[in-house]
Amino acid sequence: MDLNPLLISVGNTLLAIIVCLLLAIPIGAFFAALLTRSNLYGRRFGAIALASQLAVPLYVFAGGWAAGLGLQGWMRVDSWLGPTGLSWMQGWFGKLLAVGLIHALASIPWVSLILSLGLLTCDRSEEEMALLDGGWSMLVRRVWWPRLRAWVAVACLWCCMGLLTEMVVSNLYMFSTIAERVYQDVSRDTVSPLTYIIAVFLVTLPIFALSWRLTRRLPPLRDVLVKSQHFSAYEIPLGKHRWAISTAFWFLTLIFVGLPLVNLTMKAGWTPVVEHARTVGFTWTPQRFWQTIVESLTLFQSEFYWSIMLAVGSSLTAVLIGMLLYWITSKRRDVATTTTASNPLRSSIHVLMLLLVSIPGPMVGMLLARALNQPGWLGEVYYRTLAAPIVAQQFRLLPLAWLLICGLMATISVRSWELAFSDGLNRWQVLRSILWPQIGKRTIVAVILLMLMSIGELSCSMGVLPPGVTTTSMRLFEILHFGMRHQDSGLCGVLVLLGWSAALLMRRIAR
């Protein structure tokens, strides 16, 4: 790897991060404030619409916008951009905007979720006093911003993490980033010591250091969750601007959530027709749309099968390992009250999770391939089972599973544990009378979320899939390089509908 391309990759990554932050942070903060603290019209449905995008894969965001605005999209932008606009769109600046925009769209729901947790830690009396003294400006400057600074930093880190560790979007648009340079080295088998230096010092160490520093500044997870459960949020009236602000919110939501669905629907039914002047035009027909849906469900049956098998194996493995680690790091009498500060072993688990999530995806696949591609039983496991991709996905799923498990256990009241211990309940009785009634349904929600994340995961597992195994993410990633076809739109639509179904199911279980 030459030094000059490396500098270009670093510069491109920094510029893409800036574009992503400029879009994701303001919009995510706008959504979080309105959905958690205002009397916005349609607030509940807006929260479901935003939650439906949490587990949508990066390449589906790319496909949803390419189906409309791509060179083969139904809007036919090549016909009204002209040669100059088309060359600009295919140039460096157009690729930068595309990569930054897609990562921003994928980060907006997570930014909104992170900042919503931060808003739930605010004090209601302080908010009411600030509103009485100076209105919205005083509330934002004196109450929200001091309490949200660390949460905003976490949201910024989340946006940066996607561009530093994932290469899916940058590879689709042939835009050189740090993760893309690592992936190119791995795919061409030109890995050198410089590749490891880049991965460690430009990706892993910065993410790990910032993550660890931010975790020390945030309030304990138990305090955040307990306050969110019992916090009676002060609903801030929008007053005479309620209609205008609600219109702005739903306009952004329709663009963010609705327009990709419209693009996929239009592209799925887009069919060429011969006009009177013997020229070829395009129109939308329901017959073509239905045919595309049928083809998307029948042509990719093998891909759906392997994706489901991998999702089940990876998500259950992550949950079981997370539960085992939590049990190991907890003492019998202080399961609910054990904190990271008082438990060095749990603190070391946190460090391990931060290291896992900060390793670039292509590097994960390469390291696993070198470790498992050995003669003997390791080679048999590598070539004949899903063990390698399941292990690879743990680098992304296990940290999330660990966070969810710690959060679920933190929601159990200390009084419940005290009563259980005073009554001398055994483990089965604790499971039946405490754990399942209080967190059983939420655990199902966590498993569903992990399965969706597994179906969308690509960069870690794509290099270690055994022969004959192709997942929907791998297939869609391959065919998106050749443009947006009808079946591609149908497959992206199926994955988007999975996100909506999971959001509705999680909402129903949570209620």
Image: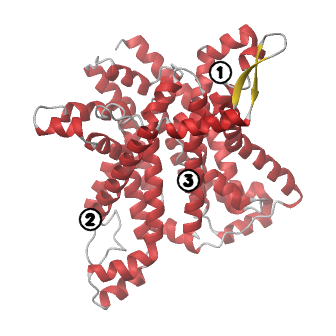
- In percent of width and height, residue 265 lies at 68, 37
Judging from the image, the colouring scheme is secondary structure
Q: Name the residue under label 2.
A: 329
Q: Residue 72 carries which label?
A: 1
Which amino acid is tagged 2?
Thr
Mark 3 neighbour density, 10 Å: few (under 14) some (14–19) many (20 or more): many
Residue tagged 3: 114
Q: Position of residue 54 (x, y in %)?
A: 55, 49
Secondary element at tag 1: loop
Q: How much space separates mark 2 and mark 3, taking CA atoms?
A: 26 Å
Q: How far apart are marks 1 and 3 (CA)?
A: 36 Å
In the rendered image, the residue lying farthest to the left is 376
Q: Which of marks 1 and 2 is nearer the N terminus?
A: 1
Q: Distance between the residues labelled 1 and 2?
A: 53 Å
| CB under 8 Å between discs 1 and 2 | no
Instruction: Please name the amino acid that badge 1 sits on.
Output: Gln
Q: Where is residue 26 in the image (x, y as percent from the top left)?
A: 67, 43
Horizontally, residue 15 falls left or right of residue 1, namely right
Q: Residue 452 carries which label?
A: none
User: Label 3 amino acid?
Assistant: Ile
Quadrant into which the C terminus falls: bottom right
Q: Is residue 286 above or below residue 245?
A: above
